[in-house]
Amino acid sequence: MPYKFEELSAQDYDQKVQKIKPRPRVIKNAIWAFVVGGLFSALGQIIFFGYVGLGLTERDAVAATAATLIFLGALLTGLGLYDKIGKHAGAGSIIPITGFANAIVAPAMEYKREGYIFGVGAKMFSIAGPVLAYGITVSVLIGLVYYLFL
Amino acid sequence: MKKEDKPPLSSGGTYKKRGKQTLSFTTTPYIASSYTVVGSKENEGPLQGSFHHVLQDNIWGESSWEKTEAKMMAFAVEEAIKLASWSQVEVDFFLAGDLLNQNITADYTARKVGIPFFGLFGACSTMAEGLILASILIDGAFAHRVVAAASSHHETAERQFRFPTELGVQRPMSAQWTVTGAGAVALASPEGICNQETHSDSSRQVRITHATIGKVIDLGVRDAADMGSAMAPAVTHTILRHLQDLNRRAEDYDLIVSGDLGLVGHKMSQQLLREEGVDLGPKYSDCGIMIFDPKKQDTHAGGSGCGCSATVVLGPLLKMMKEGLYDRILFVGSGALFSPTSFQQGESIPGIGHAVVLEA
């Protein structure tokens, strides 16, 4: 004779699991994400003002700020710090452009041992790939809408 | 003739299967020696100081994590053979497995030690599977000396199953931490062990008396960050089956320890057992819970990986048995038979649990 739990449906078992599973610490996580995400953004703003102060046009300063933040994200990843920030900050350090840098540098570092072609080259975009694929697709679609209708 | 009318297969005499899934060994294999290697984090938990060798750093002078893991397993195997006062050529078979694709840790260890080899895959239940198959070989008089081993490494598992280590992601609270560890055990028939003077010392001998082979059970869990819940039904099933097959009760054991259900899976297993009218109480523990301190070590639901139960059972638990703290332990190795490929294709995570009775 089967035991009672063997005849549970996936749904019924999932209900049991949900009751036991620890809840994510939503409030704590949200505060961390807000603070860290805010700090990255504030830092970006400071860098931006710095470039404008150095005489760059606003348009060039935006591009230079993005490049600088990407460099910082990559540097912090290389120093082994970004994953520690991310552990607490969650989306607060994934969403900013530094997180995008982390998503490319982390696999590049991880797969270096499989060589520069099939390791670094092929797997560098294993996390950021979907963001690029769909990000570029959507930007083309929006561009088309803009070109045709506006 | 209807199916039910078939005469029952013989169950008396030399037949060693009991009930539906349990084996009863007659030439009970002895544990001649065991050896465990763990990372530094594993030795900073509650079981500090009870492992045989602790790594200073997780790469151990190698050029890749995979090479480190193979070095760990090979080291554990060689040291276990030394502790048993055997030489490698005296070992009849080597049974081993790990979590990596194509069992590479076990394969490269087997290449190094040169003992006739069976590669095993049972995810985190591999150590239990190895103990059972080694016992069958010995009790079946196919071998006098068998070495079984299992390992996992936090970094090799992360990159194969999850994300690159430097990626800044948050782990859910139900997720477990893959243990960096390797355990090897040398099992022997009475003849295989007793020609050694080293084993006439005062410490107690531990034998393997029974084993219950688990069924794969899958209640549809689709959360890769909650393997405990995926494994809990299989482990629970094996425990219930074991007690029923041998007509035993929880009282017959000093400790019942699951492999690595972790905090969530272990709680679930306790609940499922209670619903079947079995309350194991504080006697029921879990290697994944024992190895880490979740508050201090940030390991969330506990340890996991083949190396978790392998090092906890072959290190601290065996030591406690030899010191007389426990006489009879039921070890239920638990495995989440998880593959990133099938998971991404929408499959749920099947679980398994194999039980072994250790008696001092």
Image (cartoon, coloured by chain):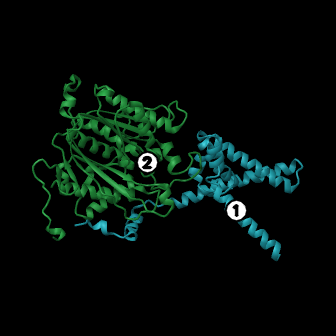
Chain colours: A cyan, B green
Q: Can residue B20 be seen in this view?
A: yes
- The amino acid on which the numbered mark 1 sits, given as a three-letter code, is Gly
Spot occupied by residue B28 in the image (x, y as percentages of width and height): 18, 40
Q: Is residue B359 left or right of residue A127?
A: left
- Say few, some or many: other residues with alpha carbon within 10 Å of mark 2 (under 14 / 14 to 19 / 20 or more): some
The structure residue drawn at horizontal position 25% and vertical position 41%, both measured from the top left corner, is B137
Query: Which one is in front, B181 or B9?
Result: B9
Q: In this view, does B333 lie above or below B85?
A: below
> Disc number at residue B330?
none
Spot occupied by residue B55 in the image (x, y as percentages of width and height): 45, 32
- The amino acid on which the numbered mark 2 sits, given as a three-letter code, is Pro
Q: Is mark 1 on a helix, strand or loop?
A: helix
The residue carrying mark 1 is: A135
Badge 1: chain ID: A
Q: What element carries label 2?
A: helix
Residues at discs 1 and 2 both on one chain: no
Q: In which quarter of the image is residue A117?
A: top right
